[in-house]
Image: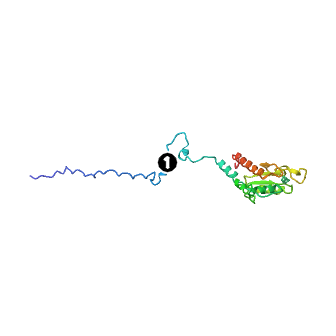
Amino acid sequence: MAVTPDTTTRPAPTTAPETAPTPLEPPLPVFPGEHPNEAPRLTPVEFQPGKALYKQILPGVMQVPADLVLAASRKSSLWPMTFGLACCAIEMIATYMAHYDLDRFGIVPWPSPRQSDVMIVAGTVTKKMAPAVKLLYEQMPNPKWVISMGACATNGGPYTRYDRVLQGVDKVIPVDVYVPGCPPRPEALIDSFIALQELIMEERGVIGR
Ligand code: SF4
């Protein structure tokens, strides 16, 4: 008797042998062994609610308003225009010299109104000269400040009864700081610059608006 093969039975399907999952790439070392001093700086911080995030991740960063930075830059780099009208200008020139050294305040004399931001009116302002002083002031870019140096520039000084002398330069341009004296000492002019620097910091919120 012939035996027919059993076609209903099929060989069990062969499956691919199970392999272990490939391990992930090892993470890069956070703290290279050759730079052990970097470890504290690179240690992730733990966020503390209630404290600004940037202060936690950048503890050395200081946050200040932009107008404060601008005002500090302006007050630390005042460029007075170099011109003088009478004997007070000699004291102004002496203040620029090495003995008083205005450069240490960032104050640099500049021989053009185009880049200057401070005008020192040093001397007698005659009515003939007043239009030229006003024109120089208008040629200066904003923001700009004026120091009236000495009695003549402030109120005519000893020339109170002289018709040809302007009784104060503030008749033609705005003045921010007045320096008394005839003539003022270089220390007085330095003091006026310090007062002007304080004024710039006080009005920082309104300049440029
Ligand atoms: S205030 Fe006195 S020193 Fe100055 S310009 Fe007048 S007269 Fe000269």
**Secondary structure at numbered mark 1:** helix
Kindly give the residue lying farthest to the top in the view shown. Answer: 50
Kindly give the residue lying farthest to the front in the view shown. Answer: 99
Which residue is at a point 72% across and 49% down the rendered structure image?
197
Mark 1 residue's CB less than 8 Å from ligand 1? no
- Amino acid carrying label 1: it is Pro
Picture quarter containing residue 106?
Answer: bottom right
How many dots with numbers?
1
Residue 138 at what x, y percent from top left?
A: 77, 55
Which residue is at a point 80% across and 54% down the rendered structure image?
121
- What residue does disc 1 label? 40
Residue 179 at what x, y percent from top left?
A: 79, 49
Please state which of residues 44 and 134 is positioned toward the viewer in this rendering.
44
Please state which of residues 189 and 70 is positioned toward the viewer in this rendering.
189
- Few, some or many residues within 10 Å of mark 1 (<14, 14–19, 20+): few
Residue 55 at what x, y percent from top left?
A: 55, 45
Kindly give the residue lying farthest to the left in the view shown. Answer: 1
Q: Is residue 101 left or right of residue 163?
A: left
Residue 91 at what x, y percent from top left?
A: 80, 55
Kindly give the residue lying farthest to the bottom in the view shown. Answer: 111
